[in-house]
Amino acid sequence: MKRIVVFLLALAMLTGCSASPGKFLPYEPSQPALAPLPVASKRPPPPASQPQPDPRQEAIDTLLRSMTVEEKVGQLFFARCPLEDGASLAREYHLGGYLLFGRDFKNKTREQVKETIASYQDAASIPLLIGVDEEGGTVARVSANPNFRAERFSSPQQLYAQGGLEAIVADTVEKDALLQGLGINVNFAPVADLSTNPEDFIYPRTLGRDAWETADYIFRVVSQMEADGMGSVLKHFPGYGPNVDTHTGSALDERPLEQFWAEDFLPFQAGIQAAQGGSTAVLVSHNIMAAVDETLPASLSPAVHQLLREELGFQGVILTDDLAMEATAQYGASGAVLAVLAGNDMLVTTDFTTQIPQVLAAVEEGMLSMEQIDQAAARVLGWKYDLGLLS
């Protein structure tokens, strides 16, 4: 364990510096957003002379004070749903959420999925975030099953070619209704990455257009998802670009920081701007962003998270990409500790039964402070509040 401690501290020191931004072109939507879902965080501030209690903050603080360390740490895990004992494991590890994959829908009916998800929620002391990757096109976990939809949802590129942004917004409404009808409250979409090269790994999942058109797309989709009460996830920060698939290995992105500011960050800024009601999170990729941190994947880099927080001003939940991917496999269970240390609020992972004890041990040994755990858990609870999961 001493070697792990030294390793983590050394990495933290190496990655503690923030990068200076290049020339940043602020995003301005080309069309007004749809009316957002009214949530607590959207109400106007009370007069300064008569301060009023904030029910959202009160709910978070009250719940946080009642929670054990084990419950707080468990909330930081957006776990891949296990094949068996999902309800009992959600209760035992106090999980923040379950991410469902194609296997959780294969050969099942709507009623079966609804009952299974309800059993998870019944077992959890704090309502779970139930997520899925339903992007459309090549990534469609739910609609790939004809029991849920006659045809899988189309990709953003297909929809845009058929009817522009209006077709995409209509598709979003239908998608949100289907997922919510099953008990799913977070869609790990939209893909905010830029790519106009069909040879890029990420290209089929993107809009396939330039930065400004993609930013408009993200703004409209996130606005609609918030109006529908559906949680969204902007991915994969800082922007996948032309990099290789991190499911199968490491990806070193050597593009200059100025390019990210001028292009890749724009869709993320648009999504953050659209979700003023707190409905969106940002997922960080495992690409190594050499312009900011040459050592660690972005998902494990304090410097990249500092960039997202301080330069882009994002105050919501930051998630890792799946820690089971090959790009982070070398870190093993200690990767979860690195992820929290870097500034992630939630960890997308399969191996939560091993990683949660690792994080708890790091807290006990002082490697992770309770202040950091409380801050991350509070953000998770805030996301749940804004999605209507907490009273």
Image (cartoon, helix red, strand yellow):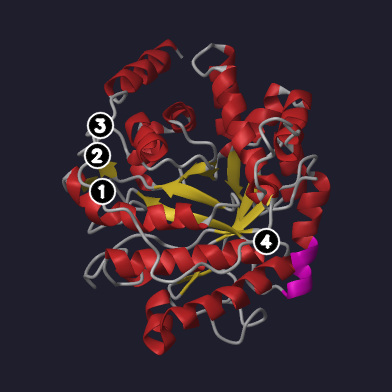
Is 48 on the left-hand or right-hand side of 136?
right
State the CA–CA distance, disc 1 to disc 3.
Answer: 25 Å
> Which-is-in-front pick, marks 1 and 3?
1
- Specify whether residue 110 is painted magenta: yes
- The span picked out in magenta is 109-115
* Residue position marked by numbered label 4 in the rendering: 184
> Mark 4–mark 2 contact, CB under 8 Å?
no
Q: Earlier in the sequence, mark 1 or mark 4?
A: 1
* Residue position marked by numbered label 2 in the rendering: 21
* Residue position marked by numbered label 3 in the rendering: 295
* Residue position marked by numbered label 1 in the rendering: 24
Q: Is residue 261 above or below residue 214?
A: above
The three-letter code of the residue at mark 3 reads: Thr
Q: Residue 193's x, y, as percent? A: 34, 60
The three-letter code of the residue at mark 1 reads: Phe
Q: Is residue 358 above or below residue 365?
A: below
Q: Residue 321's x, y, as percent? A: 44, 47
Q: Earlier in the sequence, mark 1 or mark 3?
A: 1
The three-letter code of the residue at mark 2 reads: Pro
Identified at 47% across, 48% down, the residue is 282
